[in-house]
Structure formats: structure tokens, C-alpha cells
Image (tube, rainbow, N blue to C red):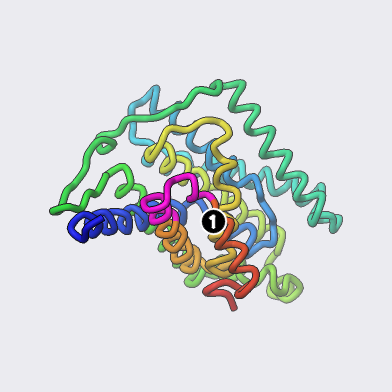
């Protein structure tokens, strides 16, 4: 392959990787909150992303409103669902100190029940939505910018920036950062650690709902598609550093770039191995992550 051919190919692969990484950040930031900050191993998080995608798909089918706008309007519903799930988890497992193994099994159960419910409701066919920008591509010389990736990228970066501001600039955010470190000290300050974790977990489900809207804008979905993101979201969380919001964004960019370059030059069948490989390397050589303390 000569230079004149490979340079545009490399440039487009790098841009596609960054855009894909932005989407990965939106999918993974909820795990950074639940797992990195709250020590809640919500392995069903990608399933909630898929639920969010199907909810906005159904609403878009009946209203023709943009899926991303619909997801923002549906945040109260996702928040209430997150509160309910955490209360069940706390009462059944965490309050009794059984959250380690039984709590993990609980979220596995939620994952499979969610998939079955989606199959019974929508079937196994692929579902997709059409937006005003789905087919638009902006070209600069030899560089292509598909709007179906650019718009979710911008929304993802805005979401990560808003969450970072929330956690560093508000009392609630600092309470979330403190709850896993010293809940007793938090009680002495008059703050209920359980309520803090409940609200923070609900916030992680809200991010899943928004990420679901971005997912269905980018590609068609089916009920089991969430399984493809399980390793990815935990790889991003660990690579970025447990509980680091900006680390999540940076790690998502790294993963997106790695997958895009692998797909472009070695074939798409190798791309899924990148997430698992980076996760293993991070655990082996820097278990605290790139931005971990």
C-alpha cells in the first residue's frame, strides 16, 4: 500500500476511533459511577443501555422525535428505575453483607431477564431509527465525518463534562466520592450513605438510558447486543482508573482508537480481542488504571 493511499486510510481510522471512543465513554461512565465509586458490580449495565435504546426506538416510532431528545426527556423514568433497582439490591444483599457474590448473581439475573423481556416484546429482529443526520457525511478533503457518529460523540463529551462538574463542584458529588472510602465519617456529617449511593446508582442508570439513544443512532440493535459491551465497559472503567470520570473518557478514546486501527488494518474479527487484551494488560501492569490514585 503506497503512502498516498495509506495516509487517508490511517487518518479516517483515527477519526473513526475517536468518534467511537466518545460513544464508548457514554456507555461506560455509568459503570465508573456504580463500580468505580460505589463498589456495585452492575454487570447488567449494558442491558440497561439496550433498554434505553428500545424505549427511545418505540417513542421515536410513535412521535418521530429525535432519539437523543427523547432520552433526555426520559431521564426521570430512568432515575426512578435506578432507585428501585438499588433498593432491591441493598435490602436483599448489601445490607446483609452479601453483595460480593450474590449481588453479582443478582445483576446477572437482571441481565438475562431484561434480554428475555425485550425478546418477548420486540422479537429478535434488528431495530433502527432514522434521524435527520443519519445519512449525512461531512467531507474535508479525504476525511469523512459521518454525522451519525459525530452527534453521539458531542453528546457523550458533554455528558462526561457535566458529570465531572457534578462530582467535583457539588456537595452531592463529593459525598459520592467519599461514600466508598469512609461511610462512617459521612454519617457524622449528617449524610445518609445509603441514600447517596441510591441516588448515584440511579444517576448511572440515567447515563445508560442516554447511551442507549446514542447506540440506536449509530447502529441497529437487537435484544442481546448488550453482551458485546460487558467486557468493554469494565475495560474502560479499569483502564481509566476506578472512579475517574475524565479517565473514563481518555480510556474510551484509547480503546476506540485501538479497535478502529485493528479493524482497518487487521480485520474487524480482531477488534473484540482488543478490549479484553487491554483489560488484562492494565490489571497486570497498572491495576489502579491510568488516572487511578
| Drawn side of residue 15 relative to residue 182, left or right | left
Q: In the depicted view, which residue is nearer to us: 282 or 190?
A: 282
Q: Indicate whether 42 appears above or below 190.
A: above
Residue 185 in which image quadrant: bottom right
Question: Residue 221 versus residue 212: which sits nearer the camera?
Answer: 221
Q: Could you tell me which secondary element the residue under label 1 belongs to? A: helix
Res. 158 in view = no
User: Visible in this render: residue 192?
Assistant: yes
* Residue that protrudes farthest toward the front in the picture: 1
124 in magenta? no
Residue positioned 69% across, 73% down in the render: 181
**Disc 1 target residue:** 275
The residue positioned 32% from the left and 30% from the top of the image is: 130
Percent from the top left, x then y, of residue 52?
Answer: 51, 38
Q: Residue at x 48, y 64 (%)?
A: 251
Q: State which region is magenta.
A: 259-272
Towards the viewer: 7 or 236: 7
Amino acid at each position: 500500500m503506497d503512502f498516498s493511499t495509506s495516509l487517508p486510510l490511517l487518518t479516517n481510522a483515527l477519526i473513526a476511533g475517536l468518534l467511537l471512543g466518545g460513544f464508548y465513554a457514554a456507555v461506560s461512565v455509568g459503570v465508573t459511577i456504580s463500580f468505580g465509586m460505589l463498589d456495585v458490580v452492575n454487570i447488567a449495565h449494558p442491558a440497561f443501555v439496550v433498554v434505553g435504546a428500545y424505549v427511545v426506538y418505540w417513542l421515536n416510532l410513535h412521535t418521530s422525535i429525535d432519539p437523543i431528545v427523547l432520552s433526555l426527556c426520559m431521564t426521570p423514568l430512568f432515575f426512578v428505575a435506578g432507585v428501585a433497582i438499588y433498593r432491591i439490591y441493598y435490602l436483599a444483599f448489601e445490607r446483609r453483607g452479601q453483595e460480593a457474590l450474590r449481588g453479582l448473581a443478582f445483576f446477572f439475573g437482571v441481565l438475562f431477564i431484561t434480554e428475555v423481556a425485550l425478546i418477548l416484546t420486540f422479537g429478535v429482529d434488528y431495530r433502527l431509527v432514522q434521524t435527520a443526520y443519519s445519512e449525512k457525511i461531512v467531507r474535508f478533503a479525504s476525511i469523512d465525518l459521518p454525522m451519525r457518529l459525530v452527534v453521539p460523540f458531542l453528546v457523550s463529551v458533554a455528558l462526561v463534562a457535566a458529570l465531572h462538574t457534578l462530582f467535583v463542584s457539588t456537595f452531592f458529588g463529593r459525598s459520592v466520592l467519599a461514600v466508598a472510602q469512609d461511610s462512617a465519617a459521612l454519617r457524622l456529617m449528617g449524610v445518609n450513605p445509603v441514600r447517596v449511593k441510591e441516588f448515584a446508582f440511579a444517576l448511572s442508570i440515567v447515563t445508560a438510558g442516554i447511551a442507549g439513544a446514542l447506540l440506536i443512532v449509530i447502529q441497529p440493535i437487537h435484544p442481546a447486543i448488550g453482551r458485546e459491551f460487558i467486557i468493554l465497559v469494565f475495560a474502560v472503567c479499569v483502564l481509566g482508573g476506578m472512579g475517574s470520570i475524565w479517565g473514563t473518557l481518555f480510556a474510551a478514546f484509547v480503546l476506540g482508537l485501538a479497535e478502529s486501527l485493528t479493524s482497518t488494518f487487521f480485520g474487524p474479527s480482531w477488534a473484540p480481542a482488543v478490549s479484553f487484551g487491554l483489560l488484562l494488560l492494565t490489571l497486570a501492569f497498572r491495576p489502579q488504571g491510568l488516572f487511578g490514585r
